[in-house]
Image (spheres, grey):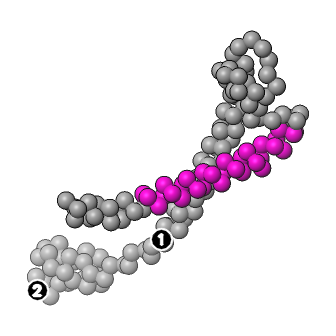
Amino acid sequence: MFKDFKYFIMRGNVLDLGVAVIIGGAFGKVITSLVYDVLMPPFGLLMGKVDFSNLFINLSGPPYASLADAKATGVAPINYGLFLNNIVDFVIVAFAIFLMIRAVNRLQKVKTAPPPKPTAKNCPYCLSTIPIKATRYPYCASQLEGS
């Protein structure tokens, strides 16, 4: 049983999947930081000094200054600002993956040479292979087309 498990784990697909998950997790953290720390602050500034991570709808009575204050009191807010951040995060990740797959597809395209011109043909009467320029086949003496 251990031998079968070792074979399963050491197959290329399982290792490739493991590497992809680890790289994907690290890539996701980088993109999340890009969205929250780099892109959203200037975007919020352009929108009138709005901190998107603090945008929420309070479902209970009293108003709260920030999302952290609302969560600290146990209120159930609708965090649409965080949702907007996650949408931007998703779009950037999807675009980056699109660019990566597009680059891989370009690298995988191999220019193939056109097929070589035929140098032989089959005699229609005896079905033997003859040179392409032949006008008469020596064994069946048939007259070939184009002669």
State the image coordinates of residue 29 (x, y, percent, origin top left). 63, 51
Q: Position of residue 71 (x, y in %)?
A: 69, 27
Q: Is residue 147 above or below residue 64?
A: below
Reading the image, the residue beneath label 1 is 110
Residue in view at x 32 percent, y 78 percent: 118
The answer to if 23 sits in the magenta stretch is yes
Q: Quadrant of residue 147?
A: bottom left
Instruction: Pick out the residue farthest to the front.
Output: 73
Callout 2 touching callout 1 (CB < 8 Å): no
Residue toward you, 8 or 138: 8
- Whether residue 143 is visible here, answered yes or no, is no
Q: Secondary structure at mark 1?
A: loop
Q: Check the image and report above or below for 27 versus 56.
A: below
**On residue 20, which mark appears?**
none
**Where residue 81 appears, x then y in whole percent?**
72, 31
User: Which contiguous range is marked in magenta?
Assistant: 17-46
User: Which mark, residue 139?
Assistant: 2
In this rendering, does residue 73 appear at all? yes
Residue plotted at (54% across, 59% down): 23
Q: Amino acid at mark 2?
A: Tyr
52, above or below 18, in the image: above
